[in-house]
Image (cartoon, rainbow, N blue to C red):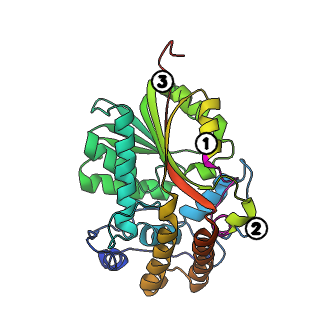
């Protein structure tokens, strides 16, 4: 395939942010090593879901191609590093503001379950571009270790940490959540954070058991994920699974059962599913408003058109049937001797 060496000048992120009131501009450039597949064929998973063994390669295809990093940072991040679904507080909120609200809400949930101290060490499971890692290090002064499959995303994460002056607090390691976590992590972490990663986990209970091993007694696990609503047919989720490398999509009731089966104490589940339709439609607006700039960075119209089709289907079926669920869960590892 033909190599594309993409630089991402500040004006591109300014443009990504241009329809979002109150959004801060970014001075980011692409510091990441290139991967080189053709955007017309990459990240196309129509009618496919993958085994635990297959999914890692497909996740890299989805998120860590050079062009897909540009796409996600614009269309879901609004030029920022909080690349996940959002909570809307104001009529003027767009993808950037709403995604930042999600990060803030997850930190509130984490700290509320057990106060996060500067002496603590947090595992950011599936850290992506690092938005959660940056926010926790800045807010709590704690150490954060990101564990993420994409080396390119990790490079963007660490470049931003250096800009923010928190590179002494944050590190990012390459790792696959579908494999056992490092043996030396037993009892290492005070908290675990994971934002919209678990849909890529083939055996969610096995992963949760690994997290229990890696947490200290009383350690808190806060996570969000995109799911099917309880009772939703998997076929109704096609608008998501056609564009995302999934094994199977969880359900809220399933995740509650999974944390208990793994040996954790279930604390709470906050349902933010009512925000999804608006977020899907805001992603469509980001594509419409920034298509020329994304084309200039090597993202083809075919790739963008596939996303427009998928997001339109996703938004429409969510409005009609509410088949997708999304929100934040909190669980914790029991203390020694706790029933």
Read off the magenta span.
239-252
Residue 71 in percent (x, y) is at 48, 72
Residue pointed to by mark 1:
255
Rendered position, 151 above or below 310 = above
Q: CA distance from mark 3 to mark 1?
A: 23 Å
Mark 3 / mark 1, whichever is N-terminal: 3
Disc 2 is placed on an element classified as loop
Residue sitting at 37 percent across and 50 percent down? 105
Q: Is residue 168 left or right of residue 122?
A: left
Q: Which residue lies at the image location 34% right of the left edge and 44% below the top edge?
A: 108
> Which label's residue is closer to the chain start, 2 or 3?
2
Secondary structure under tag 1 reads helix
Residue 250 is one of the magenta-drawn residues: yes
Q: Quadrant of residue 121?
A: top left
Q: Please give the label number shown on residue 47.
A: 2
Residue of label 3: 187
Give the residue at the far top of this rendering: 337
Residue 106 visible in this rendered orientation of the protein:
yes
The percent coordinates of residue 115 (x first, y second) are 32, 32
In the drawing, does residue 289 fall left or right of residue 339? left
Question: Within 10 angstroms of label 1, few (less than 14), some, or many (20 or more) residues?
Answer: some
Q: Secondary structure at mark 3?
A: loop
Sequence-wise first label, 2 or 1: 2
């Amino acid at each position: 395939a033909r190599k594309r060496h993409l630089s991402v000048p500040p004006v591109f992120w300014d443009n990504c942010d241009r329809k979002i009131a109150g959004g801060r501009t970014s001075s980011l450039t692409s510091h990441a090593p290139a991967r080189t597949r053709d955007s017309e064929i990459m990240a196309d998973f129509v009618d496919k879901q993958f085994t635990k063994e297959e999914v890692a390669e497909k996740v890299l295809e989805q998120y860590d191609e050079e062009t897909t990093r540009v796409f996600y940072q614009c269309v879901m991040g609004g030029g920022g590093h909080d690349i996940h679904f959002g909570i809307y507080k104001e009529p003027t909120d767009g993808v950037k503001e709403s995604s930042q609200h999600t990060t803030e809400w997850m930190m509130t949930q984490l700290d509320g379950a057990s106060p996060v101290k500067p002496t603590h060490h947090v595992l950011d499971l599936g850290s992506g571009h690092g938005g959660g890692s940056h926010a926790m290090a800045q807010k709590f002064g704690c150490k954060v270790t990101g564990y993420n499959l994409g080396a390119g995303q990790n490079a963007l994460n660490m470049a931003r940490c250096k800009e923010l002056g928190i590179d002494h607090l944050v590190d990012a390691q390459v790792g696959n959540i579908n494999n056992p976590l490092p043996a030396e992590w037993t009892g290492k972490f005070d908290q675990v954070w994971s934002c919209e990663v678990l849909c890529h986990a083939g055996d969610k209970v096995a992963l949760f058991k690994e997290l229990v091993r890696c947490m200290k007694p009383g350690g808190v696990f806060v996570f969000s994920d995109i799911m099917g609503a309880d009772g939703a047919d998997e076929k109704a989720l096609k608008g998501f699974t056609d564009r995302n490398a999934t094994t199977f999509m969880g359900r809220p009731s399933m995740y509650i059962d999974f944390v208990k089966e793994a040996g954790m104490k279930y604390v709470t589940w906050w349902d933010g599913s009512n925000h999804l339709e608006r977020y899907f439609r805001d992603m469509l607006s980001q594509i419409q408003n920034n298509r020329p700039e994304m084309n200039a960075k090597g993202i083809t119209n075919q790739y963008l058109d596939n996303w427009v089709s998928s997001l339109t289907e996703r938004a429409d079926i969510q409005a009609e049937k509410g088949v997708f669920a999304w929100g934040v869960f909190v669980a914790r590892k029991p203390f020694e001797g706790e029933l």
